[in-house]
Amino acid sequence: MWWHCCRHLREDNMLSKEEILRYNRQLLLPEIGMAGQGKLKSARVLVIGAGGLGCPVLQYLCAVGVGKLGIVDFDIVEETNLQRQILFNVSDVGKPKAKTVKKKLQEQNPFVAIEVFNVKLSVENTLEIFSNYDIVIDGTDNFATRYLVNDACFLLKKILVSGSIFKFEGQVSVFDFTKATSPTYRCLFPSPPSAEHALSCEEIGVLGVLPGIIGTLMANETIKIIAGIGTTLSGKVLMLNALSTNFQTVEFERNPDAVKAIPQTESAFKRMDYEFFCGNKTEDKPIKEISVMELSSLISSKSGIQILDVREMWEQPEIAEWQSLKIPLGEIENRAVEISRVKKTIVVCKVGMRSQRAVGILQSKFAFENLFNLKGGVMEWMRITEKTGSI
Amino acid sequence: MGIEIKIFGQLADIIGSDELQLQDIDDTSSLREKLISDFPKLANYPFVVAVGKKIVNGNQKLNADDVVALLPPFAGG
């Protein structure tokens, strides 16, 4: 009788006798208790990457009793993983990570349902995989996936727990897209480094214990979100330097300009090319141009345009009537958010070459659609001005 | 006293230190220009600037005793 009753209750995310025993130390905490443990049991958490960060995240979320865990990873276990991915043994080398992790977790806690996705995330499969989960945890090893995961969570209004590592340092943040005003990963980092400068653990190394610390912090954030206790790193990024054992937290806000770079519909998301965005491949998009005469008439008709000058700050001449926004080409990615997406924007430099590159970068990496390159640049403007006396 | 700058990740490798002191910097845009001119490799690494534990969007005036942090994104997992 009791058993029947319990089985019935279990379906409503009540705990079985075995679970009550298993989770005793958490049930004792007034902040968790039966209610919190029930919330953990009904939670569905998807972990992207079963590597350095994914392993500790999965181990702890499984042990504490998160009801459903998803694992996305298409990699196999390698010898060089064992120094930090301590869920794997020598005998696991060569086996698929996601499936191997599932087997280990299931042995650790049979009360958790585990779903395996042995796939590479793409614009085609991400929205469908994410749709069955409430919280997504990003522990991937590349920028293309990080921006893809952010954008998908934004579109689907999921909570994103993000962590990343570099040598002896780590970062953790939470993006709660159930709240319409939440900052996004793009508000924190509007642009990735170019492919040749985006270094991975594979290339530069990482201290074995570091993903353990950062991954455990990510699991902690996730548990607090599910149980609704404490405060989270939403709107904040935590930075750890393991060499100095220094933790610092920095706040950041939603940046409407950075949010505009996120595809706003599912079909726009499916048209995105994240590998291209992260410079992993190149492709030419058409660049719109405007002549000096056209620019001149736009200025005299006071049509509310913006002129973006990508020359170095010291370069002359200064064209007073342009009232330009000055961002040298080298800083364009860092300062893209300062550029209006609404006003018709004419991009200028000395002869029109650097401005063309700037338009290319802004269009492909930041989805600008309001940019025009000034043909011939400042030199052409000066030539025509001198010829006509005025313009 | 100058502006105290704390440097994270690969930026510290490029600058060769995880701390810098700079004088006479008016705002965060001039700080970027100064750093990129002193350490041209920085132009290849996007980073955000935090002033007094808050990340700056756009340009912000700097005071002589401000503590500034330069944060690059990490991809490793």
Image (spheres, grey):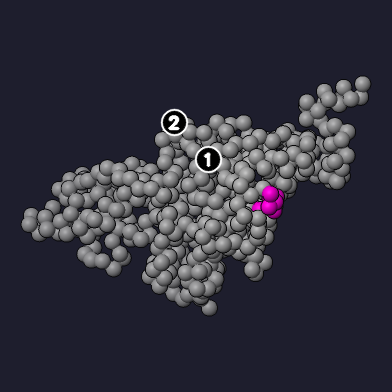
Residue at mark 1 to residue at mark 2: CA–CA distance? 20 Å
Q: Position of residue A253 (x, y in %)?
A: 54, 50
Q: Find disc 1 in the rendering and name its residue.
A: A120
Residue drawn at the location 68% of the way across and 57% of the way down: A213
Residue B44 on the magenta segment: no
- SS state under label 1: loop
Q: Which residues are magenta?
A: A85-91
Q: Residue at x 78, y 26 (%)?
A: A11
Q: Which residue is mark 2?
A: A267
Q: Earlier in the sequence, mark 1 or mark 2?
A: 1
Considering depth in this image, is A219 or A296 the residue closer to the camera?
A: A219
Contact between labelled residues 2 and 1, with CB atoms less than 8 Å apart: no
- Residue A249 higher or lower than A179, as above or below: below
Tell me: A323 left or right of B22.
left
Q: Chain of mark 2?
A: A
Q: Quadrant of residue A212?
A: bottom right
